[in-house]
Amino acid sequence: MRMELRHLLSIDDLAPEELREIVEWAISVKLDDGLFEEFTPLSGMTIGSIYEKPSTRTRVSFEVGIDRLGGNPLTLLKNDIQLGSSETVADTAAVLSRYLGAITYRCFAHGDVVELAAGAQVPVINALSDLHHPCQAAADVMTILENHPNSEDVRIAWIGDGNNVLHDLMLAAAALGMSITYAVPKGYEPDADVVKRTDKLAKESGAEIRMTHDPVDAVTGANVIYTDVFVSMGEEHISDKMSDFSGFQVNEELVENADDDYIFMHCLPAHRGEEVTDGVMDSNNSVVFDQAENRMWAQMSLLTFLIHPAAWAAFAELH
Ligand code: CP
Ligand code: NVA
């Protein structure tokens, strides 16, 4: 049985087969109503979550998911703890490791979650940084597989910014053999190193990865359409960013180019009327609230996998 300390800083910290099994585990748990009376792998453990930025889904899905696994969730807001103002990330990591079974961290600079993991003696999970959002990607591929069970049939169109959510979505898609075309305005391409890692995974899985600057090109023939806000948390100071995204709204006219049974996805929160219209968000093709729910199931699987691999494997054997 695996004993080494593992962290989840980006979704490709998991091998492709591990990611697939983690998602399948999450789907099994979601379908197993009576499970939580006897399955409490985090019993007696407190899991701490540090937030430097606001959160609805990540915070609540972690708190409820940890509680359902028998653990005790502890949310630590940046302004209430010493981190940053009078204590380094590394010292915070060493101290918190003495109390907690794992730490989740939502930060601005990705380097901070890397530093926290380097100094921690317990698993660290990135709960969103400026570069990566792995928990979102795990829930996203889970939602895609619920709707399109064969990875090789999946053709994702990303419309918008080359941001943190796209980074882990493209890594996860490539790992599982799902094809993705991302349409981004010039100047908003995804991080070059993430693209390189994605291409390597795609070579192994057979997924097709393509960039375009034309949303119609991306959506044509797609069966998954995904967008996110154009201005992410921490970017509010970048003036005029919005105007560079003219023509990138996911609206009724754009989705006409997709397969009839396409699903619409968004990590949320959505800025209705900006990157997506009400008509698309509220259509029968939209799975955005399933996606939000799946954050909890996917994170329950990730937490158990990282903290208590023996319990995770025993559950996997039974299902
Ligand atoms: N999708 C997501 O991470 O949402 P929150 O910012 O509400 O956590
Ligand atoms: N790209 C967005 C995602 C929010 C869940 C942000 O970083 O603000």
Image: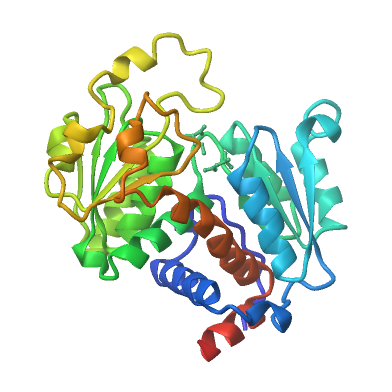
Image-based side of 306 in relation to 168, left or right? right
Where residue 164 appears, x then y in whole percent? 45, 38
Q: Quadrant of the N terminus?
A: bottom right
Residue 232 higher or lower than 132, as above or below: above
Examine the image and state in which quarter residue 85 appears: top right
Where residue 316 appears, x then y in whole percent? 53, 83
Q: Nearer the viewer, residue 10 or 65?
A: 65
Residue 174 higher or lower than 318, as above or below: above
Image-based side of 279 in relation to 143, left or right? left
Examine the image and state in which quarter residue 56 appears: top right
Can residue 159 be seen by looking at this rendering?
yes
Can residue 127 be seen by looking at this rendering?
no
Colour scheme of the rendered structure: rainbow
Point 85% across, 71% down: residue: 44
Residue at the far top: name it.
Answer: 239
Point 14% across, 40% down: residue: 256
Q: Nearer the viewer, residue 193 or 212?
A: 212
